[in-house]
Image (cartoon, coloured by chain):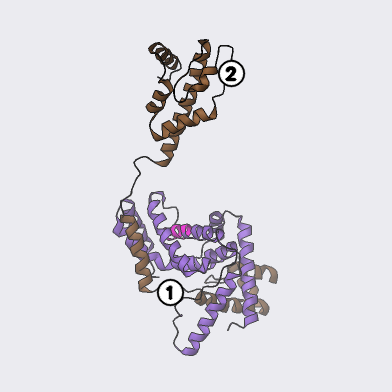
Amino acid sequence: MSSCEQAQSALLEQFGAETVPQEVVEHLAVCPECQALVEVLTVLAEQSRAAGQVTMSDAERRDIYDQVMARLTAPVVTPAFGFSWSRLGLSAAALLLATVIGLTGYWLGNRNTTQTMPAVSSEFATITEDQDLEQYQPDPSTVSLLLDDLTTGSLSTALDSLTAGFTDEEFEYLQSSLKESDFL
Amino acid sequence: MPNADRQELDRLLGASQQGNREAFGRLMSLTMDRIMALTYRLTLDRELARDLTQETYLSAWEHRHDFRGESTVLTWLVRIATNKALNALRDRKPTLPIDRSEVPAPESTTPEQMHRAGRLQEEFRAFASELAPLQRAVFELRFYQQLPFEQIAVQLGRAVGTIKATYHQVVGKLRERATERGWR
């Protein structure tokens, strides 16, 4: 080790270590200044060790131990229907409903007729074959109503509501449309 | 802390991986003082340090199967505790009040020594509270936990050079403070 700068850098790096770095030993033998630094750092390390001591009481130790063990032994409660699954289910159902609305609109438009259905389907009454299906957007309130049915009841309730005014023939047509779309 | 034998800790963690809670409890007893000291020195908040110690063990239990023996069990626990403490510090105000409560006085033989040791501890905590969380973590892991710079760099996600420079900086500040206050 040639210079005081290098020696002091090595000493700082090894601060707190039990021994002086080997590469510094030779330099220390001929450099009182760095030797003095070693003594200062040694005392400082001892002081830091003492000052950094943290003593735990038995009660404190026991408290932490008991709390951890209680958590380890507590039965794990798994919700019957996890939140993420419910969100996923709702999202899938919403997608299905949006598709049903779209297909229904397409079907009603193709029939060139007006049809009034109870509950949610009044907007479909205005759909005719002249309408471009690509531009068809269900009224948000209709979707909202369907989703209300879905969240307060079930998918079948919502579909019942949607198809309540259908004749058997219309219902069969809807079913076959859904089958063609791989929904059923 | 009782000087826990490395093999004993390995054995206890192995048993814990088999689901043995008693073994985990024993492992906790053998290492708790050290983990608590680490979390306290990093946060300077006794209550928070207790919580973090608990969380460290709960996390260790939860992830016990992830331990592959690439480090010692103690180093693994130190890593978990350090990450938890740094996360907690990140979520808190940048400057922490110095917690002077419930810190047992250091063991000393005479009232004069007790007074001096108590004053030193207080001054040391004041010094630590002025350090940035990264500086505190580097000093903790290097000085108190005696980890190699390379390992600290990996754990803290910084370059080795940055870690060494940070350690130099902290030791330099510590020297200045000791000189200013006449720590003797």
Q: Is residue B77 magenta?
A: yes
Q: Chain of mark 2?
A: A
Query: What residue span does the magenta drawing correspond to?
Result: B71-80
Query: Quadrant of residue A165 in the image?
Result: top left
Q: Earlier in the sequence, mark 1 or mark 2?
A: 1
Could you tell me which quadrant the C terminus of chain A lies in?
A: top left
Give the structural element (helix, strand or loop) at label 2.
helix
Does residue A74 appear left or right of residue A167 in this picture? left
**Which percent across, then down, holds residue B13?**
35, 56
Please name whichever residue, B141 or A35, is drawn nearer the observer in this view of the structure: B141
Q: Residues within 10 Å of mark 2 (few under 14, many from 20)?
A: few
Quarter of the figure that contains the N terminus of chain A? bottom right
Which percent across, then down, holds residue B156? 56, 56
Q: Are marks 1 and 2 in contact (CB under 8 Å)?
A: no
Q: In the figure, A142 relative to B46: above or below? A: above
Residue A161 within the segment the image draws in magenta: no
Residue drawn at x 52%, y 16% as measured from the top left: A106
What residue is at 52 percent from the left and 85 percent from the top? B116
Q: Give, as a three-letter code, the residue at label 2.
A: Glu
Residue identified by numbered label 1: A55
Q: Main secondary structure of the magenta part?
A: helix
The chain shown in brown is which? A
Q: Tell which tag, 1 or 2, sits nearer the viewer.
A: 2
Coordinates of residue B94 in the picture (x, y in percent): 60, 63
Left or right: B14 in relation to B104: left
User: What label sits on residue A134 in the rendered view?
Assistant: 2
Up the image or down, A84 lies above or below B101; here it is: above
* Chain letter, purple: B
Q: What chain letter is assigned to the residue under label 1?
A: A
x, y percent for residue A182: 43, 18
- Amino acid, disc 1: Thr
